[in-house]
Amino acid sequence: MASVTLQREGAVGVLTLNRPDNANVLNLPMARELLAAVRELEADTSIRAVLLTGAGKHFCFGGDLRGMLTQSAAENASDDPRAVITAYLLELTGDLHAAIVGLVQLDAPVIAVVNGTAAGAGVGLVAMADLALCGSSTRFSLAYTGVGLTPDGGTSFFLPRLIGAKRAMDWLLSNRMVTAEEARSVGLVNEVIPDAQLLDHARELAARLATGPRHAFAKTKRLLSVSRSELEYHLALEGRTIAQQAASSEGLEGMRAFLDKRRPVFPSLSHTP
């Protein structure tokens, strides 16, 4: 089963993260498929608006921590597991970040339709969208530092620009759950819709945008993106940083503790990373 699907509903492209049994966590195959789907959208000038959503109960829980650790364990015993994790994350974030750049630069408006929970890179996918709608029960959490990792998916780039540097730092350090209404009040999402009406409302919005002036929309997106001219550099830095951190003592302990459902015990200052 494809972990990302792209369907066309008239002039609207519906891009769906499709690992519902795993809360749509991002692994390497999903990042590759997301990038491939974005390349399809770039080539299809008949698409005038894009919906980005998640199959099942949740939008996206972020990165697949189990997959990262499993990947390192599955490699040849002679390989350095830390080097394996670093290489894996560099490849994963490379594809994910290329997909994000593609969506940001797409002529068509991109609307994030956020169901359930968005965590980690899932928040980045919401933040990078041109517009974002969420259900009334939707929750957001950055989650990275809670498992000893650093931001990716554009979260450290987009959030300060959307909600302010101090609030972004609070969310990144506290990892607290943010309600739909708080997300709306600070500018992460445009509207909060009753859960049962979310997808229908999003489809109506996309259909209206799809009848609008395509070139005017595209040029408006370009104007707004001028202030984000350093996006690709920043995403590359995010990718290198999370890859290095995931292979550190903190990152390995944080991910293992999360999967073991226990509180992490991070190394003391006397330990090397």
Image (tube, rainbow, N blue to C red):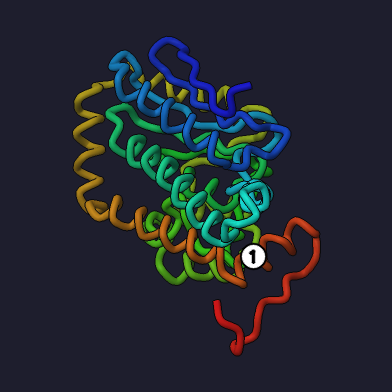
Going by the picture, which residue comes out furthest to the right? 261
Relative depth, front residue between 86 and 105? 86
Between 150 and 208, the one nearer to me in the picture: 150
Q: Percent x, y for residue 188?
A: 47, 50
In the displayed structure, would residue 265 be above or below residue 167? Answer: below
- Quarter of the image holding residue 261? bottom right
The vertical placement of 94 against 245, above or below, is: above
In which quadrant is the N terminus drawn? top right
Farthest residue to the bottom: give it. Answer: 270
Q: Position of residue 70 (x, y in %)?
A: 67, 49
- Residue at 65% of width from left, 80% of height from top? 267
Q: Is residue 271 left or right of residue 22?
A: left
Neighbours of disc 1 within 10 Å: few (<14), some (14-19), many (20+): many
Q: Tell me where residue 263 appears, x and y as whole percent.
A: 77, 69
* 12 sits left or right of 245 in the view: left
The quarter of the image holding the C terminus is bottom right
Q: Is residue 171 visible?
A: no
Kindly indicate the quadrant of the structure image that contains residue 253.
Answer: bottom right
Residue hosting label 1? 252
Q: Residue furthest top?
A: 10
Q: Is residue 123 left or right of residue 100?
A: right
The residue lying at 68 percent from left, 43 percent from top is: 137
Q: Secondary structure at mark 1?
A: helix
Instruction: Please name the residue shown 64% across and 29% down the image.
Output: 55
| Amino acid at dot 1 | Leu
Point out residue 56 in the picture as x, y percentages from the top left corner.
Answer: 69, 30
Whether residue 219 can be seen here:
yes
Q: Please state which of residues 128 and 208 is positioned toward the viewer in this rendering.
A: 128
Q: Residue furthest front?
A: 78
Residue plotted at (52% across, 59% down): 83
Decide if residue 171 is on the left or right side of residue 165: right
On screen, residue 101 above or below 83: above
